[in-house]
Amino acid sequence: MSSQCVTSKTGPVPVVVREGEAAPKPDIADPEHQPAAAVTQPKWTRYIPSVLFLAVFLAVLFLLVFLLIPSPMGITGSQPAREEPEDSDATNPVVDLGYSRYAGTYLNNGVSQYLGIRYARPPTGDLRWRAPVEPEQTKGIQKAKEYLKQFGPVCLGLRDTAGNEVDEDCLTAYIWGPSNVTTETKLPVMVFIQGGGYTHNANANWNGSQLVEASGLNIVYVSFNYRVGLWGFLAGEAVRKDGSLNAGLLDQRFLLQWVQKHIASFGGDPDHVVIQGLSAGSGSVALHMAAYGGRDDKLYAGSILQSTFLPAHPPVSELEWQFNHTAKQAGCQGAADRMKCLRSISRDDLQKLNDASPFPGRASNPLYYWTPCLDGELLQDHVTEMFAQGRFHKVPALLGTVTNEGSTFVPDVSSADQLVSSVVDNFPKLNSSHTDELITLYPKEDPLPQHDTYFPSLSRAYGEGTFICPTRTILNALCDSGDVATWSYRYNVEDNETVAEGFGVPHVSEAPAVWAPEMLPSRPKESYFTYNAGSVSLVMHYWLSFVRFLDPNVQRMVGAPVWHPWSGNQSRLVLQLPDPVMENVTQLERARCDFWQSIGPAINQR
């Protein structure tokens, strides 16, 4: 690997922008995005008793001025005049997408919210297991979900029960952006691809309004649902002939194309889109970077990969057994047209089959049964191989992992043999030579609370093999390309309760710090409202700086260290409290990752 990588286009030590100051215009590929204001400090870290008197005084003064001086904007003076369709409700924003008009909601922080926007036709009936198609034209304003402030139904995951919140008809998008925008505003766009192991929409209802507010109302944020499990990743030659392989990935790409067509209607810039993924969503970002041999379809200008999940991606030929198993369970194995038979089955009956089974020759279910496959078109080879060959779309990237990626996935094991058995359940092509080396590289470690003897070793092995080491492979490929700057991190903010449970800093722990703790559907650990609250401003500043400037340093938090790009010494930023620091990857971790890279063919990663 080369010892030099591309550094930030804003220079080795970018300027720190202090709160309330205008940021300098960085030298980036899209120079027109000069910020209107520095990143707004999140509200949960802004309580300063010494300014309360001043705040009250200014509020009273503003009220007096408001009452004494007539406003040409009337009672809605905080919002500028907006052009609305004739049949719109003036109390709600309305966007015209050509095929439909959607009503959103004005939030109280200068952000407009649009929930449940259909970006593709319902993938039901004959459209099951086919590539997404354009939505049908509608009349009037679609407003039910927007007015009720509800998200649309998420896509059916493993063992889900269909209903109002989970359905086969699920291809909807959610947008948050500043209220005072036009089609010429051209703000940077952040598109989030959610995780869930390709088996669930695990992050469907995460609210992006705080990210928009914290940016100083300088970004547009998009999230969406895509097909998963049986509905998104059924594979076999029958699907190839009468349908589309990797339908879930095609949904994602279709959404990115939808953003190119329509994001200007929300004030976004289609030429400055940053795709962000978490877990399987991050793995999806990597797959899109390598899609069609790395073809540049002008869909995005930067990427954020958080805890990149790269399970086995088998070729279609190795998944015929899975298709046959599904068809047999559905009573379609003997049908003249098995795809027609599968499409005729009711949603609820087919959903009963949306579950996992052991891989051939194994007794236990794998952690992840439905995953993307190598279809020879969208995915032409294993993603790490594509990156190693330089066959990927080269854009600035920010990527990393948490310290203990595997801890919440693996079972308790008490021996080296049980460790090996658990790993082989997920990677059945491993041989005895592979497993012997595995035991050598992952010996028994110091015990962890509430767990058995070999749990720490198995946790490290699965976490590195599935998340940490594939991330390193991508980082090195980006570095070796010599074309783009890349930044890496290790999230190490510890919650005392989670550490006491023996999980350390587990998978997706960084979520409260990236999105803000109040924006997640389920309440995060209390530490994010107390002793870990400082991580929110730290992380959010870095992330939003990257989204706006393709460099995490331009508007990093005051006092935060310069985040140096990944290079030949494999340096990454440890995001921790009280003091984040740069570190080099240890020689032991490098050796373990070299092992995982060497057995790539056996685990269908390479």
Image (spheres, rainbow, N blue to C red):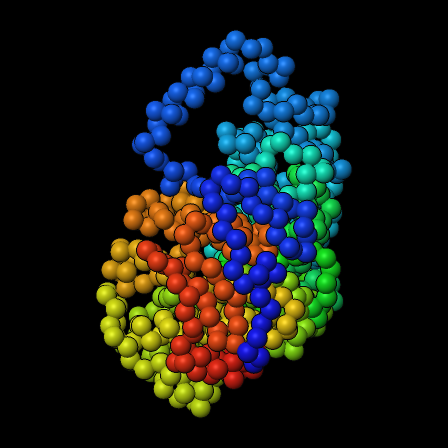
Residue at 43% over, 74% down: 585
* Residue 267 horizontal side relative to residue 568, left or right: right
Residue at 23% over, 65% down: 449
Q: Quadrant of the N terminus?
A: bottom right
In this rendering, the answer to whether 320 lies above or below 139 is: below
Q: Is residue 580 visible?
A: yes
Residue at 62% over, 31% down: 180
Specify the farthest residue to the bottom: 433
Q: Nearer the viewer, residue 32 or 331?
A: 32
Q: Position of residue 164 (x, y in %)?
A: 52, 40
Q: Position of residue 393 (x, y in %)?
A: 67, 66
* Residue 370 horizontal side relative to residue 340, left or right: left
Q: Position of residue 440 (x, y in %)?
A: 36, 86
Q: Position of residue 362 (x, y in %)?
A: 45, 78
Q: Is residue 317 visible?
A: no
Specify the farthest residue to the top: 68
In this rendering, the answer to whether 187 lies above or below 64 is: below
Q: Residue 382 occupies which quadrant of the picture?
A: bottom right
Q: Nearer the viewer, residue 566 or 415?
A: 566
* Residue 267 horizontal side relative to residue 164, left or right: right
Residue at 61% over, 60% down: 9
Number of callouts: 0
Q: Quadrant of the C terminus?
A: bottom right
In this rendering, the answer to whether 503 lies above or below 521 is: below
